[in-house]
Image (tube, rainbow, N blue to C red):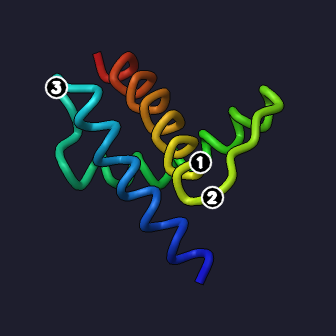
Amino acid sequence: MHFLWFILIGIAAGWLAGQIMRGGGFGLVGDLVVGVIGALFGGFLFGLLGLSAFGLLGQLVTATVGAIVLLFLLRLIKR
């Protein structure tokens, strides 16, 4: 059940990151996939910084931040 929540939060984070990071993107499906990977990346980044998030909102914020950073890096590479 936790895996399903992780996927759903990653999808929501990818959509939010796509809305925040407007411009030449990867499309809806690409941003959603980046959101799921960004959720892992966000958890890693928050761990490095010593931050932790609790609850659904905290997980969504962590995943969204990770997805935004990942989208930013991917768009730099894409250029």
**Residue 55 against residue 69 in the figure, above or below:** below
Q: x, y percentage for residue 64?
A: 46, 40
Distance from the alpha carbon under mark 3 to that under mark 2: 32 Å
Residue at screen point 23% across, 35% down: 19
User: Residue tagged by mark 1?
Assistant: 58
Distance from the alpha carbon under mark 1 to that under mark 2: 5 Å
Is the C-beta separation of discs 1 and 2 under 8 Å? yes
Mark 1 surroundings: few (<14), some (14-19) or many (≥20) residues within 10 A: few
**Image quarter for residue 67?**
top left
Amino acid bearing label 3? Gly
User: Residue tagged by mark 3?
Assistant: 24
Q: Which mark is residue 55?
A: 2
Amino acid bearing label 1? Gly
Amino acid bearing label 2? Gly
Which corner quadrant holds the N terminus?
A: bottom right
Residue 57 is left or right of residue 13, and the answer is: right
Q: x, y percentage for residue 4?
A: 51, 77
Q: x, y percentage for residue 70?
A: 47, 32
- First in residue order: circle 1 vs circle 3: 3
Q: Nearer the viewer, residue 53 or 3?
A: 53
Residue at screen point 57% across, 42% down: 62
Mark 2 surroundings: few (<14), some (14-19) or many (≥20) residues within 10 A: few
Residue 16 is left or right of residue 35, and the answer is: left
